[in-house]
Amino acid sequence: MRTVAPPDIIRDTTPANPMRRTPHINQGPHVMTDHGPAPENVAVLVCIGGRSRRMNGVSKPDLRIGTETILERLVHATSGAAQHLAVGHRDTALPPLPETVSHFVERPPYSGPAFALAQAAMTVPRHQPWIALLAGDLPYFDSAAFTALRCAARPDRVTAFTDETGRPQWLTALWPRSLLVDQAETVEPNGPMRSLYQEVEIQSLTWNESPRPWQDCDTFAELHRARRILA
């Protein structure tokens, strides 16, 4: 595991789950294809720095579902990605991150997930043209969900899962790198996650069956449910 240093401000002008679940792409005015960026063209940023107040401050990415932590499940779900970057503060008393996962801590510290992800995005090299933003507490996000995001991707907008109410799920999203880096420069410390998405066109992706890829573990009851479902 290596630590990635926060960048100075950079201005970039470079333009199988056994349960079969079926995604639905909202076509809109644009023709969609079944092709998308290959995993090796995607950098995966996993937000790990939440306070977890409803779970007594535990590190949710380190919670186990079966034999794996949630973070390990996310790494396997996005297998083949160009890189995996855990973003946010992490207690040094916790076990080491998986060997293939690098660690990024924003500065100033505790500046919120939007600001942390914005800074981390600016460290992604230009030859990795896509960036996935994922929450670190998603037990149901699997390789099928990752494939669905990639197949729906467009070079001029964000692709994000959207829930039944039409609300985009900010941390199950795939961005063109150049677009995310441009947006990152506008995010202020402790700004809300939606500030990263201001005035950005979003390609909505829905999921027809339960559990949904964006469902997280915010309580111990939700953790126990995930363990029952995924056992």
Image (cartoon, rainbow, N blue to C red):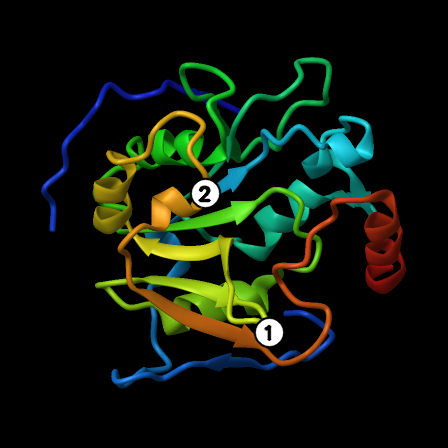
Residue beneath the point at 45% across and 56% down? 173
Q: CA distance from mark 1 to mark 2?
A: 20 Å
- Looking at the picture, which amino acid does disc 2 mark? Met
Q: Is residue 122 left or right of residue 166?
A: left
Characterize the local packing of mark 1: few (<14), some (14-19) or many (20 or more) Cα atoms within 10 angstroms: few
Residue 37: x and y, percent? 33, 64
Which residue is depicted at the point 66% across and 28% down?
Answer: 51
Could you tell me which residue is drawn at 21 percent across and 42 percent down? 182
Reply above or below: 216 against 201: above
Which residue is painted at 57% across and 31% down in the image? 99
Residue 35 x %, y %: 34, 76
Query: For the C terminus, which image quadrant?
Result: bottom right
Closer to us: 19 or 112: 112
Q: Closer to the camera, 112 or 126?
A: 112
Q: Mark 1 — residue?
A: 164
| Residue 229 spot, x, y in % from top left | 84, 64
Q: Secondary structure at mark 1?
A: loop
Tell me the number on the disc at residue 200: none
Residue 22 point in image, percent of width and height: 59, 82
Indicate whether 116 appears above or below 220.
above
Q: Quadrant of residue 91?
A: top right
Element under disc 2: helix
Tell me the kind of residue under disc 1. Answer: Glu
Q: Few, some or many C-alpha atoms within 10 Å of disc 2 (few <14, some 14-19, many ≥20)?
A: some
In front here: 197 or 101?
Answer: 197
- Is 124 on the left or on the right of 113, as rendered? left
Q: Kindly tell me whether residue 66 is visible in this rendering.
A: no
- Disc 2 designates what residue? 193
Asked if one can make out residue 45 in the rendered structure from this viewpoint, the answer is yes
